[in-house]
Image (cartoon, rainbow, N blue to C red):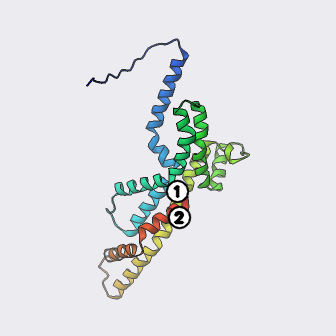
Amino acid sequence: LPLPNVGINVGTSDNPDDLAVTLQLLLLLTVLSLAPSIMIMTTSYLRIIIVFHFLKSALGTQQMPPNQLLAGVALFITFFIMTPTWNDFHENALKPYLDKEITIEEAYDKGIEPIRAFMLKNTRAEELKFFLELSNAPRPNSPADLPITVLIPSFVLSELRAGFIIGFFLFIPFVMVDMIVASILMSMGMMMLPPMMISMPFKILLFVLVDGWSLVIGSVVRSII
């Protein structure tokens, strides 16, 4: 089998098209290096992973499930939620660009629209107003006129708020279990016994009996779609 030969040449050129290709290559490498951050900040992954960590803290389990497992589950749920948006991006922007039917500028304009629509759907107006005031940008006439530099931080702040609200409601039933177990132990005179040690099995049992994973994941998905 022939061995691949990969080479990178740095030199001068009189053709402006060579510079354009080089800049496009640098832009592509930059986007690929920032791809994980772009995915976290422009999808539902942020809300899901925050809810999972709040759930883990509410249950009181230190090592189970592992953080890597939670991140993997959150990633695949994100794929499930974002599939319609990414299909729209592929059909209207990526595929025509790869078929050389549109330019890269047209591909960007068409590809950003489904992502923009998803973020606008899950962004509060208060956050948009807050970042518009911070940027001193003029008030847009329509959502399509919102700068992407304002929309993304507004979406991130909205996702953080939504994740913390869901986390608060997750804590309530487990805190009640802790309080009941602590009251029973105090009434029995077992003040030296840590309540968390006794309440953890009951919290896990309660979570399993009510089919907690389906309830939590279903609630999060319905709050986004």
Left or right relative to 121: residue 90: left
* Quadrant of the image occupied by residue 159: bottom right
* Quadrant of the image occupied by residue 223: bottom right
Local packing at callout 2 (Cα closer than 10 Å; few below 14, some 14-19, many 20+) is: few
The residue that disc 2 covers is 165
Q: Residue at x 32, y 77 (%)?
A: 198
- Measured along the vertical axis of the image, is residue 116 above or below residue 203? above
Q: Which residue is drawn at 46% across and 70% down?
A: 171
Sequence-first tag of 1 and 2: 1
Which quarter of the rendered picture does the N terminus lie within?
Answer: top left
Left or right relative to 135: residue 4: left
Q: Nearer the viewer, residue 183 or 28?
A: 28
Give the percent coordinates (x, y) of residue 40: 47, 48
- Measured along the vertical axis of the image, is residue 15 above or below residue 107? above
Q: Which residue is drawn at 46% across and 63% down?
A: 217
> How far apart are the two marked residues, 1 and 2, measured between alpha carbons?
9 Å
Left or right relative to 91: residue 50: left
The residue that disc 1 covers is 160
Given the image, on which type of amino acid does mark 1 rest? Leu
Q: Which of 123 and 172 is in front in this view?
A: 123
Which quarter of the rendered picture does the C terminus lie within?
Answer: bottom right
- The answer to whether the residues at label 1 and label 2 have Cβ atoms under 8 Å apart is no
Give the percent coordinates (x, y) of residue 83: 50, 50
Given the image, on which type of amino acid does mark 2 rest? Ile
